[in-house]
Image: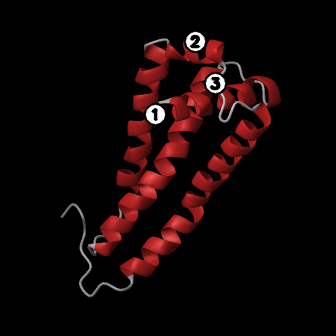
Amino acid sequence: MKILDVLYYYYYLFYTKIIPEDEPNATVIFTLGASCSFPMGMLLDCVLSYNCYYSNTYLLFSVSIVFWALFYFLYYRTKLYKKVIQARPKFFGSHRKTIITVFLFFLVTASFMFWGPIVSKNIFDECDCKKELFE
C-alpha cells in the first residue's frame, strides 16, 4: 500500500506543480490506474496469446477500467487521498530518490503499452490453431 501512496502523492505533486490541473485527484487516479493497468494488460495479452487466443481491445481496456474504479474507491471515495497528501510519503527517505523512482516506474509501465503488443504477437505467431476468446 505504501508504494501506491507514494505514487499517488508524487503524481499529485506533478499535476499540481508541474502541470496544474483543475481537478488533480481525478487526473492522478486516471494516471495511477493507467500505470498499473499497462503491465497487467500486457500480461493478460501474453497469456491469451500463449494459449492461442486473439486478444480483444475491449478486454484490455476493461483492465484499465477496473484499476480506475479500484483507485477511485480506494483513494477518492474513502478520502484516503487527504491522508496521503498530508503524510507526504517518500521512498528511501529522500525526495530526489523518490522522484527518480517514480519517473522510472512511469517510464517502464508506459513502455509496456509499446513493446507489449510486439511480445504477444511473437508469442501468437507460434500458434497453429488461432481462436477467438468470445466465440
Describe residue 113's horizontal placement relative to residue 134 as left or right. right
Say which residue label 2 marks: 82
Closest to the camera, between mark 1 and mark 3, is 3
The amino acid type, in three-letter code, at marker 3 is: Pro
Q: Which mark is residue 89?
A: 3
The amino acid type, in three-letter code, at marker 2 is: Lys
Q: Quadrant of residue 128?
A: bottom left
Rounded to the nearest angstrom, the CA distance separating label 3 from label 2 is 12 Å
Describe residue 124's horizontal placement relative to residue 94 as left or right. left
Residue sitting at 48 percent across and 54 percent down? 39
Q: Badge 2 local density, few (<14 within 10 Å), some, or many (20+)? A: few
38 or 99: nearer the viewer = 99
Secondary structure at numbered mark 2: helix
The amino acid type, in three-letter code, at marker 1 is: Trp
Rounded to the nearest angstrom, the CA distance separating label 1 from label 2 is 18 Å
Q: Is residue 54 visible?
A: no
Quarter of the image with the C terminus is: bottom left
Residue sitting at 66 percent across and 22 percent down? 24
Q: Is residue 12 visible?
A: yes
Mark 1 or mark 2: whose residue is earlier in sequence: 1
